[in-house]
Amino acid sequence: MIVVLQPTELIVLVRAINSLGKLGHEVYFECGTNDLKIKTVNATRSSFASVHFREVFFDKFSSPLPSGSLQRFKIPSSSCSNVFKLTSAMERFVLKCKMFLSSQDTVLTVQYFCKFGIVKTYNMSIIDCEQLEAVYSLEESANHLVISARLLGEIINNFRQSSEELTILLDSGECTFQNHTFQTGPSMITTQIPLNATEFDVYRVHSKCEVTFCQKELRVILSFCELISPMIRIYCDRPGKPIIFACTHEARLSARYVFATFPSDGSSLPNSQRSECSRRLSSSRTPVPLQHISTLSTGEK
């Protein structure tokens, strides 16, 4: 695998890797004959993320793999964050970036070609891994929304970051965002933001539902989604089934984020201290179903 990126595309790739690194402890790389996917899943399997870069995204893309094959490996997120670090120096001085596998495909080499003839080279050991896929179906989701990425960001900014969970209530003509809490009493602050269906570019709700998921995970992905697309697609079904956020930039790249939601009986947990509630609620989330395909680094899709 050999890829070359220009500065603008490099910043997008770095932002993508950084956002995945905030969700999971490892970043999975899957290189095909004409595309590159980076993925992650967190330790509790409550969130899965995948960013798909197609060949046209890169200035140069070369893969020695036969058609239909994949080259797969993973790298700790901490190592990725040290190499793919967005700084003012990168934006001002890096002219292009080259990535390739070297040393019998055991090391990922990243080279930054900078002004004044400076070349910075980083080598990261890679670990062979299985193909990681979340099991979900956009077509089978009962509800499909399309909303402005900027508007969604403004909505989320109305909620306290200390409020760990966010609930979306879908009705036939209105969608309501609200913070999720088990506590009751005069000290409890409830924030609700209702949106009319006309606020969405697409609002198809075939099944009324109420889904609750981690707000922190949504905050992590929003800045990257705003970078690549003005619109975000949302797919959901019912409590306990994953909620999916997706965005696309023309035919060059796309991103999908799959978050676990809490089962419908999650609200029955007893009142207690907030930390205890959050811990119990988190443990009640239905994990995102995952599929591990093959244990070899190269194989059929």
Image (cartoon, rainbow, N blue to C red):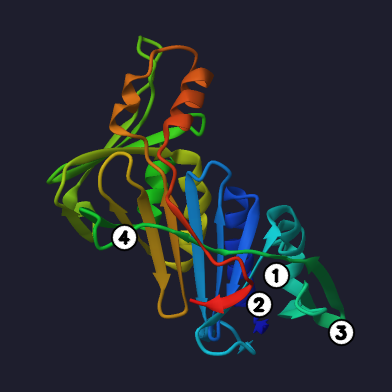
Query: How many C-alpha atoms fall within 10 Å of the one at disc 4: few (<14), some, or many (≥20)?
Result: few
Q: CA distance from mark 1 to mark 3?
A: 16 Å
Residue designated by label 1? 91
According to the picture, the residue beneath numbered tag 3 turns out to be: 117
Q: Position of residue 117 (x, y in %)?
A: 87, 84
Label 2 crowd bin: few (<14), some (14–19), many (20+), radius 10 Å: some
Residue 86 left/right relative to 188: right
Q: Nearer the viewer, mark 4 or mark 2?
A: 4
What residue type is disc 1 on? Glu
Q: Are marks 4 and 3 in contact (CB under 8 Å)?
A: no
The amino acid sitting under disc 4 is Ser
Q: Residue at x 21, y 60 (%)?
A: 202
Q: Classify mark 3: residues with Cα within 10 Å, few (<14), some (14-19) or many (20+).
A: few
Residue nearest the viewer, comparing 99 with 288: 288
Q: Quick check: 181 above or below 3?
A: above
Instruction: Residue under label 2, please give it.
Output: 7
Query: Which comes sooner in the sequence, label 4 or label 2?
Result: 2
Q: Which badge, 4 or 3, is on the more N-terminal residue?
A: 3
Residue that carries the numbered disc 4 in the rendered image = 137
Secondary structure under tag 4 reads loop
Q: Secondary structure at mark 1?
A: helix
- Of mark 1 and mark 4, the one earlier in the sequence is 1
Q: Amino acid at mark 3?
A: Gly
Cα distance, mark 1 to mark 2?
7 Å
Q: Nearer the viewer, mark 4 or mark 3?
A: 4
Which of marks 2 and 1 precedes in the sequence? Answer: 2
Q: Is residue 7 above or below residue 264?
A: below
Indicate whether 119 appears above or below 191. Answer: below
**Of callouts 1 and 3, which one flags the residue occurring earlier in the amino acid sequence?**
1
